[in-house]
Image (tube, grey):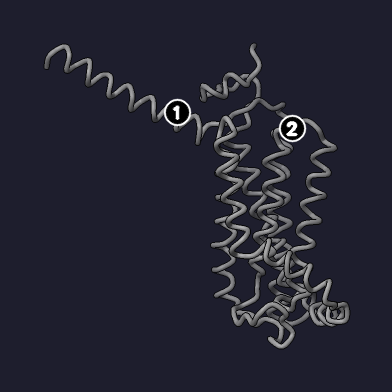
Amino acid sequence: MTVGQHESSGSGTGKHVGKWRYFHDKFVVEERYLDPADRRGLYRASVILVVAGVALFAATLISVLQADGLSAADGPVRDWLLGLRSNTLTAIMIFLAVVFGPIALPIILLVVVVAWGFAAKHAWRPILLASAMLTGVIISQIILQIVRRSRPPVDQMLFGIDHTFSFPSGHVLGACDFLLVGAFLIFSRRKNTRAAVWGFVGAGFGIFLAALSRLYLGYHWLSDALASVSLSLIILGGVIAVDTWRTARVPGERITGELSKAETPRD
């Protein structure tokens, strides 16, 4: 091989390595320093969320299968909402159902992930958000086919007839994952506790509206929405654990990402 050929080959290899390093730093690496107590707190929160989610989902599922317990409130809540129906309120609920529906929400998610991915130094968090949403879709579809619960009577549905299964609610699970996971990924990088509290309050309000719209329009039972919330708590706990494991470093631990090094304090 001539010297020119060797340099050309080395240049090509260098470009390949450079592209891989860019991909690694942009899409994989996002490391940050935390106090050891803060990192332990994140792991503890993830465990609490997963345990609470599993317990709530188990209680809801058992009550649905046995037609008692938590599911005993399904009928009364449905009857109460039927008495609240009006043209104005129906229009608002249809708008909410569309926003959190299987067409609009994926589009919103795509826009957020792409814009966030390009704007941020690292694309770790938008990728994690998209992964959490996809996980929720897969889990809900599996449970739907296993439980095979019927929806409320079709003559009570106000936005078209839906003969698919109802447990859990895909609309509510999608809203929960998008709002809860999104809030965590945004506010976990900020020191403003008040802003984080308000962020999660806003997420909770959005989840309440998404669930209310599905119950009001006659497509789900209350226990369907509770199951979705419980599943989202499990997913949120998993996201917190994975994000902490991948990004949280305490002083003395090695930072592997070149871009992350620029954000860490100098010793």
Q: Secondary structure at mark 2?
A: loop
N-term-proximal mark, 2 vs 1: 1
Identify the residue under disc 2: 190
Q: Residue 53 versus residue 189: which sits nearer the camera?
A: 189
The x and y percentages for residue 267 are 64, 11
Above or below — where is 136 with respect to 59?
Answer: above
Q: Residues within 10 Å of mark 2 (few under 14, many from 20)?
A: few
Q: Residue 166 versus residue 73: which sits nearer the camera?
A: 166
Above or below — where is 71 with respect to 30?
Answer: below
Q: Going 85% across and 77% down the picture, which residue do you hit?
A: 86
Q: Secondary structure at mark 1?
A: helix
> Please, what is the three-letter code of the amino acid marked with disc 1?
Tyr
Spatial CA distance of label 2 from label 1 is 25 Å
Q: Going 71% across and 50% down the picture, which residue do you hit?
A: 180
The x and y percentages for residue 252 are 62, 19
Above or below — where is 49 with respect to 188?
Answer: below
Above or below — where is 140 with respect to 148?
Answer: above
Tally of marks: 2
Figure quadrant of the N terminus: top left
Identify the residue under disc 1: 22
Q: Residue 91 versus residue 82: which sits nearer the camera?
A: 91
> Please, what is the three-letter code of the amino acid marked with disc 2?
Arg
**Going by the image, does 194 lie left or right of 239?**
right
Q: Residues within 10 Å of mark 1 (few under 14, many from 20)?
A: some
Q: Quadrant of residue 177?
A: bottom right
Q: Residue 243 versus residue 80: which sits nearer the camera?
A: 80
